[in-house]
Amino acid sequence: MKLYAAKSSAIRAAKAAGLEQYEIVEQDGQFGFRPIEAEDSCEGEALEAMEQERDEAQNPDAPEVPEEAPADEPQQEEAPAPVVKARNASTVESPVKRVWAIADSMPEAKRKDVIAACVEEGIAFFTARTQYQKWKQNQAT
């Protein structure tokens, strides 16, 4: 067994070897790995069948539970639908010019009022915000 100075290196090596189940072993301050033997599936199935027979004998009126797919067969799970973030886009033509025109028509208004008026007309919030700042800087010069 090859030994590694760090436990994480042993874990990485076990995964690289394609092991799904492994055990980390420490020897003299170094770490290694060894595979874990899976239990015999025949024994597990026999034990499960005995338990089911016992349960049926104890409660004969219980409804039968359908058998599930064997554990060694991969189960298909439905992937969740991807979350698509709605993009905030302007719905008017020339939104930049529109923001400047609205800001020119409301020179004494507060910033939030100008931005609200822009959003009401269909201009994206962030476009309105950015262009208002540029308009404001242009007014100062």
Image (spheres, helix red, strand yellow):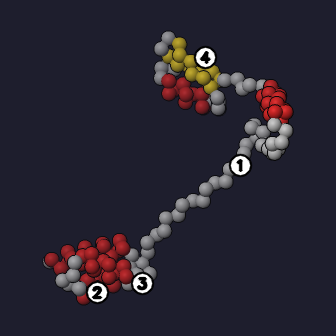
User: Where on the picture, by quarter, is residue 37?
Assistant: top right
In contact (CB < 8 Å): disc 1 and disc 4 = no
How many neighbours does mark 4 have within 10 angstroms: few (below 14), some (14-19), or many (20 or more)? few
- Specify the farthest residue to the bottom: 105
Location of residue 107 in the rendering, given as x and y in whole percent from the top left corner: 20, 84
CA separation in Å, label 4 and label 2: 76 Å
Dot label at residue 1: 4
**Residue in view at x 57 percent, y 22 percent:** 24
Q: Nearer the viewer, residue 45 or 54?
A: 54
Indicate the position of residue 27 as horizontal and vertical percent values: 53, 13
Q: Nearer the viewer, mark 1 or mark 4?
A: 1
What is the distance, in whole Å, between disc 3 and disc 4 at their CAs?
Answer: 69 Å
- Alpha carbon separation for disc pair 1 and 2: 56 Å
**Element under label 4?**
loop
**Is 47 on the left-hand or right-hand side of 136?**
right
Which residue is under mark 3?
A: 92
Looking at the image, do the residues carrying marks 2 and 3 touch, with CB atoms under 8 Å apart?
no
Mark 3, Cα crowd under 10 Å, few <14 / some 14-19 / many 20+, is few
First of labels 4, 2 by sequence position: 4
- Which is nearer the eye, 66 or 109? 66
For mark 1, give the secondary structure.
loop
- The mark that comes first in sequence, 1 or 2, is 1
Dot in front, 3 or 4: 3
